[in-house]
Image (cartoon, rainbow, N blue to C red):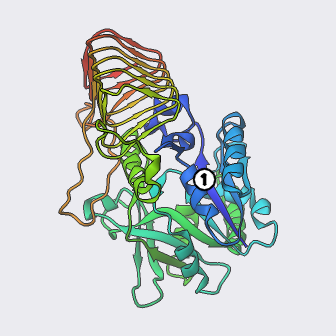
Amino acid sequence: MVKAVILVGGPGKGTRFRPLSLEIAKPLFPLAGRAMVEHHIEACSKLNDMQEVILIGSEPNTQMSPFVREVSAKYQVKVVYLQEYKALGTAGGIYHFRDQIRRGGTSHFIVMNSDVCCDFPLQEMLNSHLRHGKDNIITIMGTEVEKTHSMLYGCMVSSDTNNNEVEHYVEKPQTYVSNTINCGIYVLGAGVLDDMKLCYQELQHRTPPTDCIELERNILAQYAGTGRLFVYRHHGFWSQVKTPGTAVYATQYYLKQLQDQSPGTLAEGPNIRGDVLIHPTAAVSGTAVLGPNVTIGANTVVGPGVRIKHSILLGGCEVGAHACIFYSVVGGNSVIGPWSRIEGSPIVINPNQPLAHVANPSTFNDEGKLNPNITVLGHNSTLCKGTMVLNSIILPYKEINHSYKNVILL
């Protein structure tokens, strides 16, 4: 019997995802037509003996409850959302809802961050964990990245000759430790909850006391070198989804999955270039050229002569004739005027570097200027006829009647 816990965060998290998260909770943002966290739930539903998927976070119930009902019916697996009374950290929510997790005699459970994208080899990881035969251990999914990017993540040093035991773990070190990083996916034995209790009691005696428990710093770092922390090495695709730019990149991967697994789901036609997903309720002119890596949301209208590539358009948008949208995310219910242009900077991965992954660059560089990234148009915005927005972030409810480049329009 298996349970899964997915950490969905809350409104105070995911600030780099704004302004998109001002319209929709980040875990519900669509990647290839499905909510970000739905990909996790689908992977969980394929596991043998999956009993329950528990979403934990501080997002409002009003947003999460309809989604939970929908995916429970869709994947025929019990899904519940447990709302924290405040943000409790990556392990605080697990400890707070420990009785729900243990109910039914759970001996081990999967934990995933909602903002990761991969092929979710959960059964293989679970089998690797169970081979150790203990209920008070943790297995981390790890992957290798370039040395220069490793310090952005939790880093671990492991033994190749001792069952992949993790000897040393440091969360976001200030200097190079290892290029094997934490993917944000774990299998925990139920006995780990007892150690969380000890950690919670210790934190209550600090000044000031805190209910916040961080899995990475308070638990994983303490388990390293004790024979209770192991790594499952993942060699497939993996990426974090921290920014709108990485959402476009993750969508490209999920669209490729759809092409391989359900090719009839994607759009076809003489003006479709590569992988394109169009919602059944969207209306797209036959002369519009779409792709590669494009998703068109529900009730969106795309006019004649439009060109779109490497972009996400949420529901209810209207794109006027001959507009161009490249490397961008367009928020819901926005209007793109005729002959206008929205363009961001493409995400470039070095094809000659086998360990290359997409980083999540900060919004600004050291000079206080915007780093090159995709363009984001907030929901309910209007881009007037003939205007151009390049490498910019536009907050919701804006009417753009001038051209802009490298700006944040508040």
Indicate left or right for 378 with 191 as reference.
Answer: left
| Outermost residue to the left | 352
Where residue 308 appears, as percent x and y from the top left, is 31, 32
Pick the residue in front: 381 or 188: 381
Q: How crowded is mark 1: few (under 14 residues within 10 Å), some or many (20 or more)?
A: many
Where residue 368 appears, as percent x and y from the top left, is 27, 31
Is residue 214 in view?
no
Say above or below: 400 vs 205: above
Pick the residue in front: 312 or 159: 312
The answer to which image quadrant residue 128 occupies is bottom right
| Outermost residue to the bottom | 161
Say above or below: 257 vs 380: below
At label 1, which amino acid type do we have?
A: Leu
| Helix, strand or loop status at disc 1 | strand
Where residue 326 appears, as percent x and y from the top left, is 28, 32
Identify the residue at image location x=36%, y=20%: 303
In which quadrant will I find the N terminus? bottom right
Where residue 269 appears, as percent x and y from the top left, is 34, 39
Which residue was labeled with disc 1?
Answer: 7
Pick the residue in front: 278 or 374: 278
Identify the residue at image location x=38%, y=54%: 256
